[in-house]
Amino acid sequence: GQQLSKYDLLINDGLLTGAEIEAATEISMKTGQSIEAILMEKYKILKPDIGRALAGFYRTPFFEFKSGLPVPSDLIQGLEANYLRNQKWVPIRREGDVVFFAVENPRALDKLDDIRRHIPAKAYRFLVGIVEDILKTIDYFFGAEAKEEPKQRGTTVSKILDNLAMEAKPSQEEDESE
């Protein structure tokens, strides 16, 4: 049957109560964290279970961020990371004529129209993702793109460690390890 709310599946599976979802919704409104992030942290709901619930509700596949995702340079070219963060959508790949996007709400028609205006394609596929994963994907894609230009903000721990390792190494001019 049709799920009436995004989290019906979690309630039906006995993982959550309606009251817990209401409480998570209130926390979300106060903190700005997504309801899904709160369900995972406070109520120990596993991401695959949230994915199943969202995929079932929106009738679309669930998108989950994984590092190592290939960066769709042709799709993110000309897009601003901040804009995507505010809009909570990101193009994730192209397969033939189809462009795939991770979106917070695959039924938000204004968002889908906005996406179509920014990225012309013959066909579109919208995958539902939790906000935190969408933001991580945006940061990952644009971080990978911006590797050439030095950035003071958004310096990653690994970059700092790399720099420290470089400084700590005695300089060996003749050793060409590259």
Image: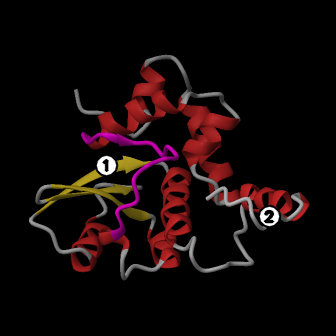
For marks 1 and 2, the one nearer the N-term is: 1
> Which of the pair 31/4 is nearer the observer?
31
Is 111 left, or right, of 65 in this rendering? left
> Which of the pair 33/102 is nearer the observer?
102
Residue 37 % position (x, y): 61, 44
Q: Amino acid at mark 2?
A: Asn
Q: Nearer the viewer, mark 1 or mark 2?
A: 2
Q: Residue at x 39, y 53 (%)?
A: 70
Residue linked to disc 1: 127
Q: Residue at x 76, y 58 (%)?
A: 162
Mark 1 nearby-residue class (10 Å; few <14, some 14–19, many ≥20) = many
The quadrant in which residue 153 appears is bottom right
Residue 6 vertical position relative to residue 79 in the rendered view, above or below: above
The stretch drawn in magenta includes residue 68: yes
User: Start and end of the magenta stretch?
Assistant: 59-73
Contact between marks 1 and 2 (CB within 8 A): the answer is no
Quadrant, the C terminus: bottom right
Quadrant, the N terminus: top left
Residue 99 vertical position relative to residue 74 in the rendered view, above or below: above
Q: Amino acid at mark 1?
A: Leu
Q: Residue at x 78, y 68 (%)?
A: 173
Residue 110 % position (x, y): 29, 72
Circle number at residue 24: none
The quadrant in which residue 5 appears is top left
In terms of secondary structure, where does tag 2 sit? helix
Residue linked to disc 2: 163
Residue 115 vertical position relative to residue 24 in the rendered view, above or below: below
